[in-house]
Image (cartoon, rainbow, N blue to C red):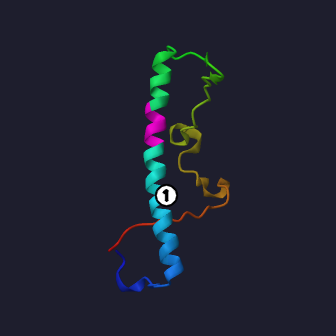
């Protein structure tokens, strides 16, 4: 990692919170994979069409793709940073031991 420049915190409450977050993130990944599998099964079963399944409506919706700004010749060489929205901050929890 980044070595000794990263401060270490041995607070027991924070360790418990980190352990719980890590456990839940792992569970979330497994659930997301299960959801993807089941969604694919449903898509195949309904021939990729919006369909009622019992009390459920399995609805297909299509949205336009993102804009490929690099392919717009008028924007070549233009600094688009001035047009960016505010930055966001993201945190991740890693096992380093």
Q: Range of the magenta residues? A: 32-37
Identified at 55% across, 41% down, the residue is 69
Looking at the image, which residue is at 58% across and 55% down? Answer: 79
Question: Is residue 45 magenta-colored?
Answer: no
Residue that carries the numbered disc 1 in the rendered image:
24
Vertical relation: 94 (above or below) 2: above
Q: Magenta region, mostly helix, strand or loop? A: helix
Is residue 34 shown in magenta? yes
What residue sits 52% from the left and 77% below the top?
Answer: 14
Residue drawn 58% across the image and 51% down it: 78
Classify the position of the N terminus by image quarter.
bottom left
Residue 53 position, x and y percent, is: 60, 18
Q: Nearer the viewer, residue 72 or 88?
A: 88
Left or right, 97 with reference to 61: left
Residue 79 vs 33, above or below: the answer is below
> Which image quarter holds the C terminus?
bottom left
């Amino acid at each position: 990692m980044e070595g000794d420049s990263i401060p270490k915190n041995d607070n027991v409450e924070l360790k418990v919170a980190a352990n719980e977050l890590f456990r839940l993130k792992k569970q979330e990944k497994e659930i997301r994979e299960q959801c993807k599998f089941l969604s694919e099964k449903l898509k195949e079963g309904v021939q990729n069409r919006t369909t009622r399944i019992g009390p459920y409506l399995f609805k297909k919706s299509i949205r336009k793709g993102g804009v490929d700004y690099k392919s717009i010749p008028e924007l070549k060489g233009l600094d688009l940073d001035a047009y960016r929205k505010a930055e966001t901050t993201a945190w991740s929890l890693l096992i380093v031991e």
